[in-house]
Image: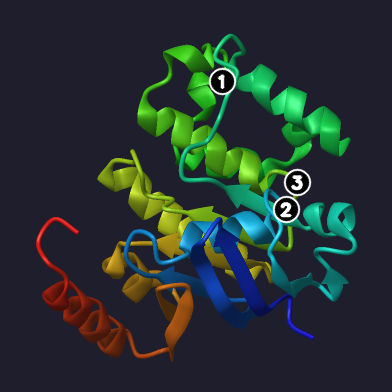
Amino acid sequence: MKKLEVKSLIKNYGKIPALKGLSFSADGEIFGLVGPNGAGKTTTLNIISGIILPDAGEFFVSEINGIKEKIKAKKLIGYLPEEPFFFDYLTGEETLNFVSSAYKIEWEKDDLLKKWMEDLQLMPYLKNMVGNYSHGMRQKLAIALSIFHNPEVILWDEPFIGLDWPSQEKLKEIMKELKNKGKTLILSTHHLELVEEVCDRAAFILDGKIVWEGEDTEKLKELFYDYLKEEPLGN
């Protein structure tokens, strides 16, 4: 079985369907989830991360049932939400220490993690309060928190938000290093160039269903732009 298996997920918000039997799998690769707002990307990541439950369907993380064995599955997952939450009165270092205590790990002994935080220019700001961080610095801290416990499956929802161009380039390198370590990365994004540069495969989600999946990024761009042509301006 692959590192991540998602099978026939269904999710409704009241009478509004969000996912309509969505299925995909990924294993030791960078897999892109591409689609317009409201397509179901974030709902999918929220289910896999354990934030919400599906109405039907299931998923497996390294053969662990993510619904029946939620805690075990969560330990193998790292999640970067589109809007990370922080306690603004803590410093970056205190935030790392606080979350580390839940995982019973010592992040400061992980030389590779510290190298990545240096690459993203986060380390010099760890003594500063998070409430004083820029949007980009908060994003960098959230990225570090998503991978510092060495998860097998990493879920990133729009990882480029708030990052300047040099940090985006560094993050692409980190993605490839994570893949080379055998990690499975799921990227939810609108950035087709990111998918083209770093993803091994991608899926196009529309109205809660995967309508295309593959390696051909030109086909993905064609589908995305065809969708934009069909949508009225402002939708």
Label 2 Cα neighbours within 10 Å, binned few <14 / some 14-19 / many ≥20: some
Which of discs 1 and 3 lies nearer the camera? The answer is 3
The mark found on residue 59 in the picture is: none
Pointer 1: what residue?
A: 126
Which of discs 2 and 3 lies nearer the camera? The answer is 2
Most extreme residue toward the front, as rendered?
Answer: 15
> Answer yes or no: do the residues labelled 2 and 3 have beta carbons within 8 Å?
no
Which of discs 1 and 2 lies nearer the camera? The answer is 2
The structure residue drawn at horizontal position 84% and vertical position 28%, both measured from the top left corner, is 101
Q: What is the spatial separation of the Cα atoms under label 2 and label 3, in whole angstroms?
A: 17 Å
Pointer 2: what residue?
A: 50
Residue in front for this viewpoint, 148 or 57: 57
Residue in front for this viewpoint, 229 or 103: 229
Label 3 Cα neighbours within 10 Å, binned few <14 / some 14-19 / many ≥20: many
Q: Secondary structure at mark 2?
A: loop
Pointer 3: what residue?
A: 149
Vertical arrangement, residue 39 with respect to residue 79, above or below: below
Residue 3, position as x, y percentages in the image: 73, 75
The structure residue drawn at horizontal position 49% and vertical position 22%, both measured from the top left corner, is 124
The N terminus: image quadrant: bottom right
Q: Secondary structure at mark 3?
A: loop
Q: Does residue 98 appear left or right of residue 10 in this picture?
A: right
The disc labelled 1 sits on which kind of residue?
A: Leu
Q: What is the spatial separation of the Cα atoms under label 1 and label 3, in whole angstroms?
A: 18 Å
Q: Does residue 234 appear left or right of residue 227 in this picture?
A: left
Label 1 Cα neighbours within 10 Å, binned few <14 / some 14-19 / many ≥20: some
| Mark earlier in primary sequence (1, 3) | 1
The disc labelled 2 sits on which kind of residue?
A: Gly
Q: How does the figure colour the protein chain or chains? A: rainbow
